[in-house]
Amino acid sequence: MEAFWSSFVGLITSPTIMLVMLSSVTVGIIIGALPGLTATMSIAILVGLTYSLPRELCFTVIMGVYVGAIYGGSITAILLNIPGTGSAAATALDGYPLGVQGRASFAIGMTRTASIVGTLFGLIMLLTIAPLLAKIALLFTSVELALLALFGVLVSGFVAAEDLKIKGWIAAFLGMLVSCIGIDQLHGYFRFTYDVQMLMAGISFVPVMIGVFGIPQVLDNMKLVLPPRIKQTGSLLPKWRDFSRYIPLTLRSGLIGTGIGIIPGAGEDIGAWMAYFAAKATSKDKEKFGKGSTEGIIAAETGNNSAIGGALIPLLTLSIPGSPPAAVLLGALLLHGIRPGPMLMFEFPGFLQEMGAIMFLVAILLFVCGLIVAKFFIKVLDIPPKILMPVVAVLSVIGSYAIHIRIFDVRVMIIFGIIYFFLFKLKYPVAPFVLGVILGPMIDENLRRAFWVHGGLMPVLTRPVALVLFIGLLIMVASQIGWVRNFIRKKVFRR
Amino acid sequence: MDEKKDLRRNDLIACLILLVTSIFVLGDSIRMIFFVKIPGVEKEGWFVAPGFFPLILALGLIVMSLIMLSIALRGSGKIVFPGWERIRSYFKSRDELIMVAEIGLLFFYTFVLVGNIHFALASFIYLFLAMSIVRAASWYKILIISGVVSIAVAYLFGNLFKIPLP
């Protein structure tokens, strides 16, 4: 703890570091808010740009952009229904309806507070029980990762469906099927490519995500007569009594986000979704979810920001990155001669605490910088939708192109956007579809790898964590089959 | 009640499309199934083949679309495919016509304009047409807004953020 405070004092008394930190967090929020510019991409660029800087300054810039970008995605998710980053997709589900109700300022204020609390929660976990948590994370091998991801996708289908639960699962299956297009990572086999060269590289989830969230919105708002726009009221500074009601939810979401962040490869996106679905499943106001639930946005934002601290735990203690941005951060650490792993505490005493102090200050600055950036962004909602929506379409084109610099991605974005415009009318939820596209490759690769290693399904299920997850999956599916439900009700509960 | 019946009728068409697609995917997945020698196992296994996961997904989708089919049939009362009259009445609504025009315009923008002419010019044409269709403002205001926005966006992303533009 002493090392943490001495690093903290060292950082706060350096005007250069504080100024750099302020700028990095602001830039991070702007990057996160712009569709198509991800935290991973910006950190990757920064690793090269900050190479010549002193170690302390370099990680100040990287961590500032990392935390800022994960939060920034929620701003456009709330204002335009286009998540700036993948991790803000869950926030859009309730954030945008809040914006439509004239409560965008309130939603942005709440998500900012939730992001700060989430970041601090992850940080506390990182500083206190990092080695223990990292050991638990190592229990997750291919099969557990596959089952956990499958569990997440199916839960999302189960929870997000507004009309019939089966529509959520159909959306999830369709999402996973889309993720199968392209080269198979295990055998190098081309699946569903039909000799189309562009399909061989697969379908990236970013254009799909931008399309299914953004394009239905654009088309829905392009009508001759639109209902009058509701005036935005409320402050960007949330009242303490408004937020304090959600502290238990915040802590629970923080725990879920950190837990997911620790699992190698899971990351902030899954952290947000899992926290969101857990909040919906346990909420007293389930019917409000998807229509502007405060609980929904708080859970999602706490979940994704706490996953940052979680992702750093296996990175610093085992040299295994917990998320894609953490993987790029590993590169930065190695470039600066820092080898993360069990020996980090001995080889670089005080480094973990230094990272903790940077994260702590970044979380505090997120409050100030978020407020400044949001003040400018909120003006967007004063623009009439008939003018704003075509501009959103143009931004969606840039966002989908920027990831891989391929015109093909722009077309993918439009095609999926229009398909989902019709599916949306039929009440097929968007969340399970997006989650299916994101997690599909993880399920496919890990499941087959596990079969390869263990020689079949049965040996795989001898692993306790895998068995628990498998039983959980079976129960969830069975609970949705009418005759199984009736049978259990008659035979078990009447006895 | 009618809204629910309409939804189920539309569900019926959607799940029939889904069923056909799933059967097609199933066929393709079976083609991708081949047996692989797995270390430590006597027999060769098919469950590590590239077709395994899509096969499971296709089977799941077939089962679910059949369930949806039965729900839709029960909910809609009878199979009603949209006839000419229904399609014609649909396109009589101005909002529906605008929606079709906007979809067409999005395709025109992304498949014809983007990548073939300068991004700022492509965006200007799209913005001008998209706003004109819905009469977002008077024509000269639309002209100014489209011009300013397309140039600003191209400059901001292309020059300032150094993001390659299509």
Image (tube, rainbow, N blue to C red):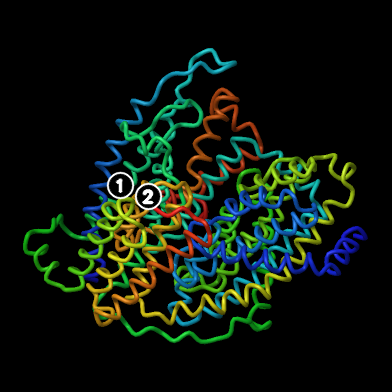
* CB-based contact (under 8 Å), mark 2 and mark 1: yes
Residue B65, numbered circle: 1
Left/right of residue B31 with respect to residue A276 in the rendered view: left
- Indicate the amino acid at tag 1: Ser
Left/right of residue A346 with respect to residue B10 in the rendered view: right
Camera-side residue of A125 and A316: A316
Left/right of residue A337 with respect to residue A306 in the rendered view: right
- Distance of mark 2 from mark 1, alpha carbons? 8 Å
Residue tagged by mark 2? A170
Residue farthest to the top, as pictured:
B42
For label 2, the SS is helix
Residues marked 2 and 1, same chain: no
- Image vertical order of residue A473 relative to residue A227, above or below: above
Q: Quadrant of residue B20?
A: top left
Can residue A312 be seen in this snapshot? yes
- Indicate the amino acid at tag 2: Ile
Label 2 resides on the chain identified as: A
Pinpoint residue A228: horizontal percent, then vertical percent.
Answer: 34, 85
Can residue A478 be seen in this snapshot? no
Pinpoint residue A494: horizontal percent, then vertical percent.
Answer: 50, 56
Q: Residue at x 13, y 56 (%)?
A: B81
Pinpoint residue A372: horizontal percent, then vertical percent.
Answer: 62, 77
For label 1, the SS is helix
Quadrant for the N terminus of chain B, please. bottom left
Left/right of residue B58 with respect to residue B107 in the rendered view: right
